[in-house]
């Protein structure tokens, strides 16, 4: 199940929540508008935390394995004074977690402990397979190799672009630092090309991958 929610999405100046004054930002750059939207966003985060905790409690009661991936795609655009050209990675980095319920943990699921500080959404299939100790097919094996051997692939984090036609691929290492394509090893570059060919074959090609 792939579920996308608009919970706690923009706009944040509609006073959706009560008691939002519990979360008050401070600083000389904070004007009334910024204070209000940060309070609203922070209150929404609090409600999300409560809902996620309740959801995890429910799936822990199930007598079947369930693994949950939870993540956001970017921080909200409420930090007007923050320079994206300087803090692009921070503005596009969000918390995530992969949680296996009690039944799954009792039947082989394990916690991931290495090289997962920075990941991309395209890594989640491989990470779930690792955490659940699942057998993988050839496609999933390539995804695992990409996750283990390549830096995180993302779009240009320094611009507010909306598609691949007006941006370029950027690589980020596990310390949150930009990695230039030219600094990749020969094997890494070949792996990246293999990954792009597979993406094309699945989305616009003739699906040769199904026969191999």
Image: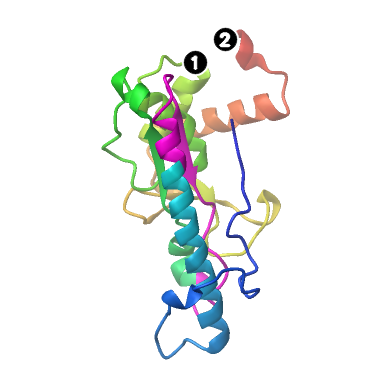
Q: Is residue 205 left or right of residue 182?
A: right
Majority secondary structure of magenta residues:
loop
Specify the farthest residue to the top. 211
* Mark 2 element type: loop
> Could you tell which of marks 1 and 2 lies nearer the N-terminus?
1
Q: Is residue 122 left or right of residue 96?
A: right
Name the residue located 43 percent from the left edge and 79 percent from the top edge: 24
Name the residue located 68 percent from the left edge and 18 percent from the top edge: 207
65 or 10, which is in the foreground?
65
Give the label on residue 138, or none.
Answer: 1
Using the rendered image of the protein, determine whether residue 142 is visible from the camera's viewpoint.
Answer: yes
Q: Which quadrant of the structure image shows residue 86?
A: bottom left
Q: Position of residue 68 (x, y in %)?
A: 46, 35
Marks 1 and 2 sit apart, C-alpha to C-alpha, by: 8 Å
Quadrant assignment for the N terminus: top right
Look at the image and say whether residue 56 sits in the magenta stretch.
Answer: yes
Q: Quick check: 174 above or below 136?
A: below
Q: Residues within 10 Å of mark 1 (few under 14, many from 20)?
A: few
Q: Quick check: 155 above or below 77?
A: above
Q: Residues within 10 Å of mark 2 (few under 14, many from 20)?
A: few
Using the rendered image of the protein, determine whether residue 83 is visible from the camera's viewpoint.
Answer: no
What colouring method underlies this structural image? rainbow
Residue topped by disc 2: 212
Q: Quick check: 35 above or below 120?
A: below
Q: Which residues are magenta?
A: 55-84
Q: Position of residue 147 (x, y in %)?
A: 41, 34
**Would you say the residues marked 1 and 2 are in contact, meaning their CB atoms lie under 8 Å apart?**
yes
Q: Position of residue 99 (x, y in %)?
A: 38, 36
Look at the image and say whether residue 61 sits in the magenta stretch.
Answer: yes
* Mark 1 element type: helix
């Amino acid at each position: 199940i792939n579920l996308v929610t608009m919970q706690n999405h923009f706009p944040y100046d509609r006073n959706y929540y009560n008691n939002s004054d519990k979360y008050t930002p401070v600083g000389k750059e904070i004007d009334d508008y910024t204070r209000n939207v940060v309070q609203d966003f922070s209150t929404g985060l609090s409600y999300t935390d409560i809902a996620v905790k309740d959801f995890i409690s429910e799936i822990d009661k199930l007598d079947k394995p369930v693994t949950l991936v939870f993540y956001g795609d970017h921080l909200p655009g409420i930090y007007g004074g923050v320079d994206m050209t300087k803090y692009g990675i921070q503005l596009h980095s969000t918390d995530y977690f992969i949680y296996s319920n009690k039944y799954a943990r009792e039947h082989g699921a394990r916690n991931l402990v290495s090289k997962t500080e920075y990941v991309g959404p395209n890594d989640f299939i491989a990470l779930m397979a690792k955490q659940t100790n699942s057998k993988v097919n050839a496609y999933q094996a390539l995804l695992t190799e990409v996750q283990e051997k390549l830096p995180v692939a993302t779009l240009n984090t320094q611009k507010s672009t909306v598609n691949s036609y007006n941006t370029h691929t950027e690589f980020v290492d596990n310390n949150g630092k930009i990695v230039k394509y030219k600094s990749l090893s020969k094997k890494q570059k070949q792996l990246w090309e293999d990954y792009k060919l597979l993406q094309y074959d699945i989305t616009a090609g003739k699906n040769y991958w199904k026969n191999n």
